[in-house]
Image (spheres, grey):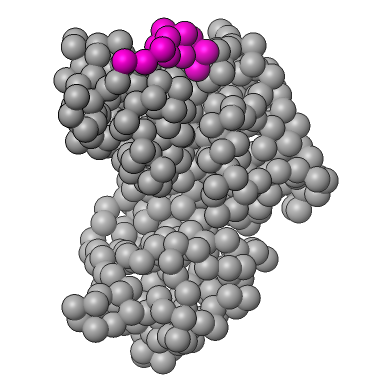
Amino acid sequence: MPWGATQPTPVNLSAFTSELSSQLTVSDAQLAQLAERFRLAMVAGLAGQPSSLKMLPSFINRPTGKEKGSAIAVDFGGTNVRVLRAELDGQGACTIQARNRFALKDAAAGYDYTAADVPAEKLFGYIAQQIGQIAQPGVVSPLGHTFSFPCQQFALNRAQLIHWTKEIKTSGVEGQDISALLEAALAKANVTNVRPQAVINDTVGTLLAAAYGQPDVDIASICGTGHNTCYLEPKHPLNGQPMIVNMESGNFDEVPQTKHDRALDEASDRPGFQKLEKMVSGYYLAEVVRTILADLAEQGGYAWGACLTQRQLIQGRDLDNILADKGDLPATKTFMAERLGATECTPELLAAVKAAVTLVATRSARLVAATFAGALLHIDPKLERRHVIAIDGSLYEKMPGYAAMISEGLRGALGVRAAQVSTILAKDGSGVGAAIAAAV
């Protein structure tokens, strides 16, 4: 039999799938329980008590939709940065007048502003130059900055970087005020007509961008490579006023883990942290599937299991293709052959692989829905009014069936009260949200 072919095996694929289903399926009753645990974690975090939710204040309210004027936005969330100039019409609409996207490192061009031997002044100086290219000469413009790195925030325009992530190591930035660094760089670049007014994270930006045109938006979430959710706290303890709170919900830890989740967590860079994110985000879903298939291969003695020790062997697009697969599962068969070298797969094996992917994706959406339900019940315990949840990210936008599974999860957690809740795609809100933050 050729390399990669499936061997005769004693494993009962139907029993394997049934056991996996019992581990990964989240019932409606469990959804309601998780929603309540999440709500209680929110309450504890807001009160400064021990909680896996950080409940970080953003120092900004939801926009009214009447904000008007021109603003500049910087969207800095990785090694690619965007700057844009936006015009707010005061009637809930925003027009992008100019934009520029640039890389912080380019080997061919011979620069890397993310390296550890590069000082903060050079990094922010480069960003200031790009801002200067789209700023209108002689026009004073407020600037909002989406800065998607761990920060300690003291005011809307004052945030200190705690530590870099996402491969960025520029020196002299950690522990420093981001707005102050940018202000100094703009002054040095003689871009004196741009005034930094706000520092926010991408989730807050998504809420601001969506709520500018839809006043019922009071929750926003990123469901993509990573996961996080923010919401509008009606009466924040800091000032007694409405304020958007960044929950850092990916760190919620009161979620039931399987042996596959525990194995993934233990092998991760930060074991014990971001437990929810490791069960729901795009970066980790493929890894959960990989651990499940490795278990199946070990139980069945499949030769193709040898390659499954390689992290990130399976990609998000593989999951999308398998979820959309129908009939005799040609996409699943292609995945098994091209990714795992399994060129002879029985229909039963292909069905088991598709079932595993479907169970992992469904659990992700339902767990996310449970956290949304918890936030909704905190905001509006009886769900007496309409709520809109704005969601950005590749899972919600592109993964087959994912958006519908979130809606089903909300119905499971909230019952008939879910009729008061709708979800919308808020694509690419972090840039526009920063511009709105500058104008609020």
Instruction: Where is residue 157? Give x, y as percent.
Output: 57, 68
Q: Is residue 202 above or below residue 369?
A: below
* Nearer to me, 122 or 139: 122
Q: Is residue 44 visible?
A: yes
Which quarter shows the N terminus?
top left
Q: Is residue 375 above or below residue 313?
A: above
Residue range of the region highlighted in magenta in the rendering: 8-20
Query: For residue 80, which quarter of the picture?
Result: bottom left
Q: Residue at x 60, y 36 (%)?
A: 262
* Nearer to me, 114 or 247: 114
Instruction: Where is residue 129? Give x, y as percent.
Output: 31, 82
Instruction: Where is residue 201? Give x, y as percent.
Output: 51, 56
Instruction: Where is residue 147? Give x, y as percent.
Output: 48, 63
Q: Say if the magenta span includes residue 62.
A: no
* Nearer to me, 74 or 33: 33
Q: Is residue 362 visible?
A: no
Side (left or right) of 178 relative to 316: right
Q: Residue at x 43, y 66 (%)?
A: 167
Q: Residue at x 50, y 63 (%)?
A: 165
Which SS does the magenta portion mostly show? Answer: helix
How many discs appear? 0
Query: For residue 391, which quarter of the picture?
Result: top left
